Amino acid sequence: MTRPLSRRGVITGIGLAGFAGGQTRAAMPHAAGGPRRRLLIGTLFPETGAQTLLGDEAWRGVALAIDAARTKIDADIEVMRADAADPDSAIQAMIRKAGKASSIDMILGSQSSTASFAATAAAELAGIPYVELDAPAGGVTRRNFRILRRLCTTTAAFTTAAQDTIARIVAPGWKTAATRLRLALLFDIGATDGSFAGVMLAGLRQAGVPVTLSMAYATAAPDLDEEVGRMRDARIDLLIHAGRTDHVLLLYQAMQEARWRPRMIIGTGPGYGLAEIGRTLGQAIDNTMVIGNPLYGPGAAAIAAAYQARYATPPRGAASLTTHVGTTIAIEALKRREKLPAALAAISLPHGSLPNGWGIKFDQSGQNQASFVTLQQWRQGALVTIDPKMPGAAKPVLDL
């Protein structure tokens, strides 16, 4: 197992790799032949801090979708891009730039659930429709907000997929009962991963599956050495880890130094899904299972090609596909010349209609019930779909 980079080296290296294509902001065209309808869209994704790379990948999907929409809509689209580090200040700055809140047709975000809680509250208070594209914490849509809609899935879907993986793939493949596994749950205390852990623990308890170790750690933890040592001493078979990108690297470094690893790891969320993770860890991450938004596939080939043409590199993860799909649907709703969220709620599409396999069906809380996650696995530096529910899925490998 090749020694991973230090935490500082990894974050620095990934940050440079993430911005190799440049930070391109969407242009703001103006009609040349008389007044046309203007659509003013705010975007809010992490541009600084540990989630910068994921935020940039999410932004790239939005930028590509907006560029494509400009050729298909009788309106001038203007974009106000802001950093999600301080959502309240960012939204107030958007309002000042627009002149008034009602001039902003919608805000797209957020990738970060922590940012989403603050941003959606600020937008609701200002009366600006907010379309959440890629922040899954369950509580985001449980606050009775009137003008919030979320196109992506929730942490509940991640937990259901993890439980199904244990019960239908891992335990049968190991020829044992799920109740006999020595299982550990490791998670950071952030909004997304903390939400996942709470639902996961409740679901396992209901299914009668014991959790040998449940360990939370600070988002800014310098290492995971103690947690790995506890898992080794407890002879953990299966680890479920919900963490950010840098946490993934800290985990694999700690396992290398301890000269130990469980029989299988299931990672949840976009932190496990970036191409940079595969390049940095190499063979160390091979066969790790991942639960995440659907990967680029044949249905998204045109989006992948547009990404390659614009950024001179293949997509770095599913985040750009997820936000591209959501942005396209949100702009399609605005074509109807109705205010959001009514125009968005009026759209209904069956599963499989969108390039990532999702459909559109909003419930009363504003959550899209036709989104889903898939089971994936790292193989020789690339993620492949191993979800048995997906056509053409690869066969799972059951040991690291």
Image: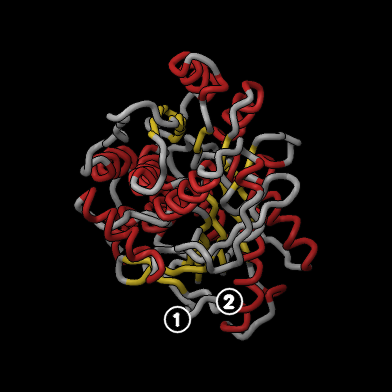
**Would residue 270 be visible to someone looking at this image?**
yes
Q: Which mark, residue 58?
A: none
- Residue 29 placement (x, y as % from top left): 30, 31
The three-letter code of the residue at mark 2 reads Val
The C terminus, quarter of image: bottom left
Dot 1 falls on a residue whose secondary structure is: loop
In the image, taking residue 287 as reference, residue 199 lies left or right, namely right
Element at badge 2? helix
Q: Quadrant of the N terminus?
A: bottom left
Residue with the mark numbered 1: 392
Badge 1 density bin: few <14, some 14–19, many ≥20, Cα 10 Å: few
Who comes first in sequence, dot 1 or dot 2? 2
User: Can residue 158 be seen by looking at this rendering?
Assistant: no
> Quarter of the image holding residue 52?
top left
> How many numbered marks are there?
2
Front-most of residues 210 and 260:
210
Q: Nearer the viewer, residue 59 or 32?
A: 32
> The disc labelled 1 sits on which kind of residue?
Gly
- Name the residue tied to disc 2: 170
How far from the left and from the top, in percent, is residue 321?
A: 41, 55
